[in-house]
Each structure stands twice: as C-alpha cells, then as structure tokens.
Amino acid sequence: MFGAGAMTNSITEIREAELLFVIGSNTTEAHPIIAMEMKRAVRRGAKLIVADPRAIWLSDIADWHMQLKPGTDVALLNAMTHVIISEGLVDEDFIAKHTDGFESVVEATRETTPEWAETITSVPAETIREAARAYATTRKAGIYYTLGVTEHTHGTDNVYCLANLVLMTGHLGVRSAGMNPLRGQNNVQGANDAGASPVFYPGYQRVSDPAARAKFEQAWGVELSPDDGMNLNVMMKAMMRGEVKGMYVMGEDIVLSEPNASNIEQGLNNIEFLVVQDIFVNETIRFADVVLPAACFAEKDGVFTNSDRRVQRVRKAVDAPGQARPDWEILCDVARACGYPMPHYKDAGEVYAEFSGLCGQFAGISHERIDEQGGLQWPCPDAEHPGTVTLHGDGPIKGHAPFQATVYRPSKELPDDEYPLLLSTGRTLYHYNAATQTRRSSGAVARQPENFIEMHRKDARKRGLADGQRVRVVSRRGAVLARVNISPRMRFGCVWMPLHFGDANTNYLTNDAGDPVTQTAEYKVCAVRVETVDDEASAAQ
Amino acid sequence: MNTKIETAETKLELEIDGEQVEVRPGATVLEAARELGVEIPVLCHDDRVDPAGCCRMCLVEIEGQRRLQPACTFKASPGMEVKTKTERVARHRRGLLSLYKADHRLDERGRPVSRGVHDKLADHIDTYGTGPELPPVNAPRASRSDENPYIQFDPDACVVCGLCVRYCDEVEAVSAITLFGRGASTTIGTADQRSLLDTSCELCGGCIAVCPTGAMTEKPSLDQPSEQIVRTTCNFCGVGCQLDLHVATVAAPKGPSQTVSQDLGAERSEVVGPQARVSETMKRVVRVTSPEPGTTVNDGNLCVKGRFSYEFIHHEERLTEPLIRGEDGELHPASWADAIARVAEGLHGVKQRYGADALGFVSSSRCTGEENYLMQKLSRAAFGTNNCHQCAAT
C-alpha cells in the first residue's frame, strides 16, 4: 500500500501496542497465535476496537465493538475519518512530509458524519466517534485486517480507507502501529514474493516493465511474454467461456475454494487438459487428466514466508508416502519434459539462491543463513543486513504515500424478498480452508463434523427452525445442506457459514463478482434463503 | 515480555550467592538469578503467565527475611543479599520433593512416572535429592473420563501447581480448566467435570506444553518417546509458527488408519493389538511441540491445528502414485515417466492448438517459496504465458 504489499509491523510488536483496531478479522479462529498476542496486549491495558458483523470472540474483550452490517465498511471508515478531520486530530506534520492528496479525502468525507454512517452501518454514531478519537490520539495504534476487508466488490476501497486512517494519523513507521494484513495461508506472502502473479515477476518486478523483462529473459535464457496474464478470478471466468483450454493446478482445490462452484465445475468439464498435483484426492481431481502425488510440508525442504515478511525454513522430517515427490522436483521434471532446460538443482536451497539473486529485497537471505540465525524478515538486501522488523521507519518506502478518496457503494447482491438473508462466509478454528488436512483430524471432526449455518434466534424463530435442524441454503447460484446453529454472535438478518466442507460446499452459494481492481471475489456478502428439508430424505442422501 | 529497558539510571544492584548483578526495577529475584546464570529450580513458573509462587520449589534465603521466600514472586531491591546454595535451602528442596513424591504416581523404580515427555519433577529429584521417605498420601481425587481426542490428564501425576490453569486463563484466555476439589484432593477439572469438548476449551494443548510433570499429555502419543526432533514452519495459517516435529520409528500398520478410530474413542482400535502384523516399521511424526518460549515468533504457543492436526501426514488416503485418465474415463496408476510425458504432451497440445495464453498455471500459497518460483518459471519460461497465479488474492 505504501510501497510494499505486506504487514508494515511485526507480530512480536503486538504485545506492546496501546491500541488495536481489528477489522474484518476473526483473529482468534483464523490466526490464533496472533490473537494470543492481542489478548496479551489487552491484559496489559491496550484498548481494543473490533469492527465485525459478528460478535466474534475478541468483541467480548473489546472496548468498542462496531457490529456493522456486512459490506458497509466504507461508510464506517469514512465516518471515522470525518470525526478525525473535523475534530482536528490529524497528524499535520506527517501529512505534509510524507503524503499527497489529503484534500481529496477531506472533500470526500465532509458529509460522511457518524449520524449518516449510523443509518447505513447501524453502528451507533457515538461509538464511531469514540473509536475514531481513541485511534487517532493513541500513538502505538495498529490496524489488523484480513479477508473481511478484502473479499468484497469494494475490497480495494476498504483498504484505501484504512490506509487513509493510518496516514492522516501518522501511524506509520512507528512500533506496534501501522497497517497489518494478516495472511491467511502459511505462504501467501512467499508465493507473491516468488512471482506467482500474473503481473509481477519474482520480487514484485512488473511484467510490463521492459527492463525487468530483459533481466529475466537474460536469467532464464528465453524470450518472455510482455502481456500481463490473467489472475485467478479472471482465469476461472475465461475457463468457463472456453478461452482457457489447459490448466496445471498445484496444491489448490479450485472447485472447493473458488466462488460460484457450479460454474467452475462446468468450466472444468469443458477444458481439454487438466493436471492436478496434490497430496490428497480433492474435488478438482474428478476432472483431472493427470494426477501427480506430492510430498507434504513435513516431507520436503524449502521456505515459507509468514505474514510479517519472515522467511523461515521448512525441513524434511519423514519420507513421503509411496512414490509421492516434493513439488519442486516434479516441476523441474515437467519443465524439462516440456523442452525447457531447467537447471538440475541439487536441493531447494539452490532454487532459493537463484530466486534471491534476481530480487534485491531478498538478496541477503539464504537457506544457510536461516539455518544459522532463524527466520529473516525482508527487505534484507545483503548478507550482512539483519532484516527489517518495522517497515517505513523513515517515512513511506514509496516517498510520498497517496491518499485515496472513496465513496460508499453497496455490495453487489443484497437481500430481497426472494433471498432475504445476507450470507457471509469464513473460517473456523478447527478446520482449515478446503479441510483436506483437518477433516482427517479427529479433534476437528469431533468439534465440527459437518457444514452449519449460524443464524440469529429471531431469524430461526421466524422460519420455525430449531437448533441442529437440517436445512437447505439456497442462493441464485446453488444450494447446499447445513445444520442450523442458533448463535448469539449473529446480527438479525445475517447468516454465516464456514467454507471447509467438500460434501456441502458453501462456495456453490457465493458470488464471483470481483473487486474492480483486484478481482478478489465477494465471498463476504451474498443473498440466500433457507428452506426446511425432510430430515429423513437428507439423512439418506 | 523479557524486554529490558537498557538505560543505566533505571538499574538496581543486588547480590546473589556473593555475586553482584544489575536488573531493572520490578524484576524478580528469579529474573536476577537467571541474569547471572544461577539455577533456581521451578515447577509452577512460566514467563508467559504472572508468577504465582505456589509450588515452593524456588524458595531461597534472603538476608533480613525470617522465612525462605519464593524467587519467582519476590521483587529484587537495591543491596539485597540472596543465597540459593545454603544447607537450609537444600534441606527445604529435599523435604519438598519428598512431599511431592509421596503424593505422586511412581514407576517400578520408585521415580515419578513420565509419559514419554520431559518431567521436571523427576529432574529435580535427580538433581537435589529427597529427604526421608514419607507414607503415600492416597488422597481421593475426582477423576473424569473425557472423550476429547487430544488431551489426557492423570491426576496422580499432577503436582497441582496450577500452571495449566493459569496458562488457560492468562494466555489462551478461555478459562476452560480450573482447580477442582479441596485440600489434598485438589485436582485439575472443568466446570461440572464436563468433557473439554463441552467447555470453552479450544484444544490448543497449551496445558500439555506447560505441564512440568507430564500429568497433562497427548492422547495420540501417550508414552511414545521421540527419536529425532526436526524444526520446521507450520503449514496452516500465515503466522509462521515454528514447530518441532518429533519423529519416531513405529510399526507401519496395514489396513485402515488406526489414528482416527482410536482417537474418536468409539471403537478403540484393534489394529495395534497383539494380532497386528508388525511387518514393517516407518518413521512417523508422533508429536508436535513448540520451541521454547521467547525464541520464535509463536513464543512457545501453538493452536489446535499446529499442535494436533498432523494426522494427515501419514493418512492412508494420501496420493501415493501418479494417475492418468484412461480411455475408460477412469484414473489409472502410472509410472512417473509416463505421467510426466503425458503432462508435457497435454500442455504442449493446448499451446499448439490455441496459443500459450490458453494455458493457466495455478500455483499455491500452501507450497514453498521455491515451488512457487518454479511454477511461475514453468509458466513464463517454458510456455511463454503470464497466466500464473495462486489462490490467495489478498
């Protein structure tokens, strides 16, 4: 956002924070160890602001819980901005020295009063005021967010709003403050760093930049395409239209994980060639032409990069079962079979050395160094550099960080008479993503054996539903079965479902409408209705 | 936690066993002793929770104090003189360890039982010795059967130091377990002695990690010693917790996975019974622990997934051989050579017929950095398309 796509601060700084603003992150369930640090900070006296449509665990210990309607984040955040500006709580020095375009935000938030936001978000105006004041007037105040912020058709706007708050209060380059997206997967950060992106080569060097292209053409000894590629959401839609004809899918269950699953399945039926490389049979394998068995994390060497840019080692502990092999070895063999002279790397460390040699910010990191010193946080430009704990210590990396004015837009699909409930999706503590690993775990199964739908007591009563009853949840795109879980965490009119269950895939329901900038799909808001089912029939199914 | 503000004017000086040491105001005698490298034994202490001073293992002599004082709670003050190696302290330790031993499950050699894990009580007995043999206490204690799949509690191996309860309150902050009962019958329990599955417990297993005596242990690897420990990074969320994978050689069972049926408790598996044919052994991950507190990003903590969701590694449903879809529409086992040749042929065919941009490469945020680098290199260098992305567009 300010020149690097990563947490600006470090996990270990959380415990010293004076204020935590947690938005769109059910941290205790999705990032339990970061939540422990947050609980520790609160025990030490830090204030906690939680913005979440659900009364998540953290809201129990929060000083302010802003239980907004799903998808109204921009209204809420612009109202906070309005309060900070109108009460003169901005950091004028920081704005003058390090930012551009503050006036556009002043202009855009002139009318976005807390009273106006209350009518949209249903968060009391006074709560918005208090939270905004506390955030602006506390020095070590950090923002922590995850997919509750980004998985919207206005996800980018949400992020802009948060960045505006950080910049106007000067909460950047300060310990325990900053803007901190918590990464959902072990190696999201590392995959992006390594260039698994349609627009970036490794190390965030743009495909569209001729100099970068020339560098990689030289390194890899081939001519490279100058055109940006398709991101995953676009790729899926191109596949449904028949424009993508062949796919190589490594370590992802796209049927279970991508929104609007029935369209994905249709697309996969139509493509001519599909390779799936994974550790378990998954939903996508039903469509595969070739299946390659891979080693899991305990059976191979390499690195993962965590949320706070820390590159850490993965080490082989046991042999892979049967003929399964590490993904990196398979990829090398495939490349060579395809006629590309991939070097014969003797181990993963050599692959890492090739990668880090092409990217300045990783140049000082190597397997050997991590083995000696433990994890290293990038940027780490040379072998003497100790790594970087807090980014932007001397002002934004970019030089001047731009403010971005935003305007509240409702989500793409809102409840109506036919589909009266607003569905959000998410993760639970016990399961993980497509649950290929955790569904094979006895504790997770004992706790949460099957898909469920959390709803408010009044919504259940209105439909005559009892706790534990089987229902069919229907959206414009599909239907799945789930058990009712009447929960005091829910808002009236809103329901919530986990995304972990292959046999009752919540992503048959979700909307693949994407954010205009990132194309990230709107997993967090779609309209559904709930129908009762004959329990006998569903049990037999 | 242990961050000390290194400014000269805020330091105070004291003496431990005749040596001078400087510490920050508010530091405890235990912290000061560690600064000097003076060993003071503890059972109930952990840096992540507030000191409680309840196990009495860390009592030391302090000049001017009539009684021995707990080093973990007693604050250092300027000019204080502490003695940790006097006969009075040694006598206290022996007496205390005798008391603990009299109220503890012992093995056939008369030592505290160890359930395949490190046991601080046994260590202390080895180091400091015991006093006179005392008659066993045999206090009646509430026991509870708990069908939770992970956490096992043995009240007779518990010294009731309460560290697990404090960790559950202060660090995990779910307060699922509590001290239960009175007097000599005090033990660790839950509200109404319910199963952990029916409490606020999040099965993080922190109680196991902090337990000094192995009274709290892991059900799946009960009494299983580990042969090798491999430090690695957790493969679930983006926190990047460091894990120690404990590897041991165990019998490779044929047939259905023993772990699942065993842990659910419904049908305690017969697979490991006397009839089980132990034809082969294999190295398996038998336990996952966190590195010591204060050394890595997770500070000694783990969640339910990191600590316990390792069963998948050795699950019988793992893919173990390459498969190719045949004419009959089914997937059939194939050799690596054939499978890779088929992949090359299939991808090349698509590129020839429709161009490189009709191919899509989906990499994975679950795989390593090196693997993501190679996947995008395959896409860009071998096929000439930038259609390469991974599942997390956050």
Image (cartoon, coloured by chain):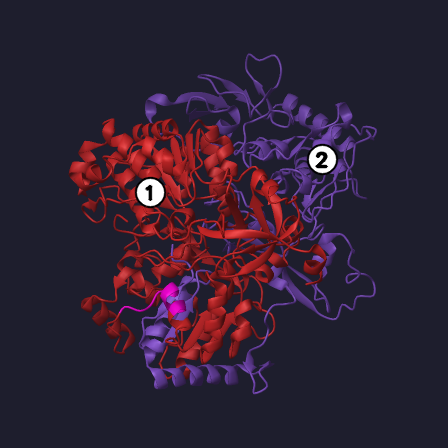
Answer left or right for A320 relative to A84. right
Q: Which chain is mark 1 on?
A: A
Q: What amino acid is labelled 1 in the image? A: Val
Q: Secondary structure at mark 1?
A: helix
Answer left or right for A63 relative to B321. left
Q: Above or below — where is B180 with respect to A472? A: above
According to the picture, the residue beneath numbered tag 2 turns out to be B158
Residue B36 or residue B382, whichever sits in front: B382
Residue B79 or residue A121, whichever sits in front: A121
Q: Which chain is mark 2 on?
A: B
Q: Secondary structure at mark 2?
A: loop
Image location of residue A515, percent across then percent down: 34, 55
According to the picture, the residue beneath numbered tag 1 turns out to be A74
Q: What's the magenta bit mostly, secondary-structure-wise?
A: helix
Q: Quadrant of the C terminus of chain A?
A: bottom right
Q: Which chain is purple?
A: B
Residue with the most extreme front position: A417
**Any mark on residue B99, and which?**
none
Q: What amino acid is labelled 2 in the image? A: Cys
Mark 1 packing: few (<14 Cα in 10 Å), some, or many (20+)?
many
Q: Which chain is red?
A: A
Query: At x 33% / y 79%, what residue is drawn?
Result: B356
Q: Which residues are magenta?
A: A228-237
| Marks 1, 2: nearer the viewer | 1
